[in-house]
Image (cartoon, helix red, strand yellow):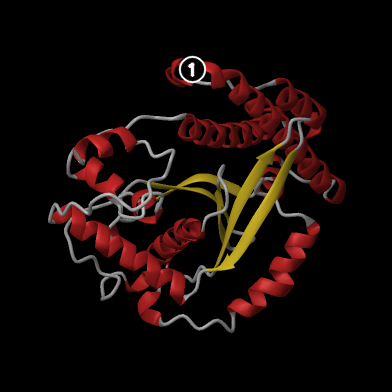
Amino acid sequence: MYFLSSEERQFLLKGLLPKTREMNVVDELRGWNWNRPPLAPVYDLKLPLYEIAGKYCPAGKDVYLKRVMGMSGNLNFLMIQGIVLHDVMVEIMTKAKKLIYTMGVSNYISIFSELSNNTYEIPGKYVKLLDNNLELLQKRVTFLWEFEARNITARIQEVLSHQPYIGEDSLAYHALPVIMEQKLDGSFLGMSHYLSSDAFIFSEPMILDLKFDIKRDFHRLTTTGYAMVIESLYEYPVNIGCLIYPQFNEDGRITLKKDFHFINEELRQWFIEERDEKMRMVFEEIDPGKPEKCYENCQYLEECNEAGK
């Protein structure tokens, strides 16, 4: 999912990166200026990035119900699917790296075999909530594992074909340069101390985020938030985001759509406005009311309707 094709890599290196050198982002919107307005948080509280960036509820009522009213909501199929499929990606990538270190470069055939013959088991706490959707999700888990196993195998083979004397550590880095679930402290910008970005590739400087959903404009707020947090911690600019939208086909194929985008001033301002508005709502316990139209898969749909009576 996170690996770029040769065409995408060329697009990044020859198309996007040169344009970022010309992109004008005012310094006060860079994460390293977290201690000054408008980035400095006004309220003394921390919000998870997904609550700031997630605008499935246009009014932000979901954040109010959770943070002010203490409601937990109900997990639905789409939420469980997202959690499980993200876990699949973390597990197979981590397992591949472990196999390289434990089995060694000379046993690369055994690494491929071991990776292909393994799979992911859906946690029991989700199984009982899936009902009739269990078979569908298990099928998608299998599709995804096989898809990634083939991709990882191809990456390792490509590196080995160019570097006959490579060692384990170098092979893991060059073939699988993705940091999964990178832990970030977002507290400088008023976010949680324990953020986890889906993936970050240092050799291809951009934030990647996997969305098992249809494309939505506010999804870019997620990559924007992570970019600004990285800037606040490491003080170097992050200008490019990539949202990845997998689509499962009945014949076992997975097709991908990737939304490459610049993390520009407009997105940064939008993110800060969302952060400030939701912080104020929680800190001052302001009920935003129900939106004109509710997201049909909102986990707080029942609680929201009950609270509105």
Mark 1 lies on residue:
127
Say if 293 sits above or below 168 in the image. below
Residue 38 spot, x, y in % from top left:
28, 74
Residue 168 spot, x, y in % from top left:
70, 40
Q: Quadrant of the N terminus?
A: top right
- Amino acid residing under circle 1: Val
Which residue sits at x=73%, y=67%? 11
Residue 87 spot, x, y in % from top left:
53, 33
Q: Residues within 10 Å of mark 1 (few under 14, many from 20)?
A: some
Left or right: 287 in relation to 76: left
Say if 197 sits above or below 241 in the image. above
Is residue 165 in view from this perspective?
no
Say if 146 sits above or below 307 in the image. above
Outermost residue, left direction? 284
In this rendered view, identify the residue nearer to me: 152 or 20: 20
Which residue sits at x=82%, y=49%? 163
**Image mark count:** 1
Q: Secondary structure at mark 1?
A: helix
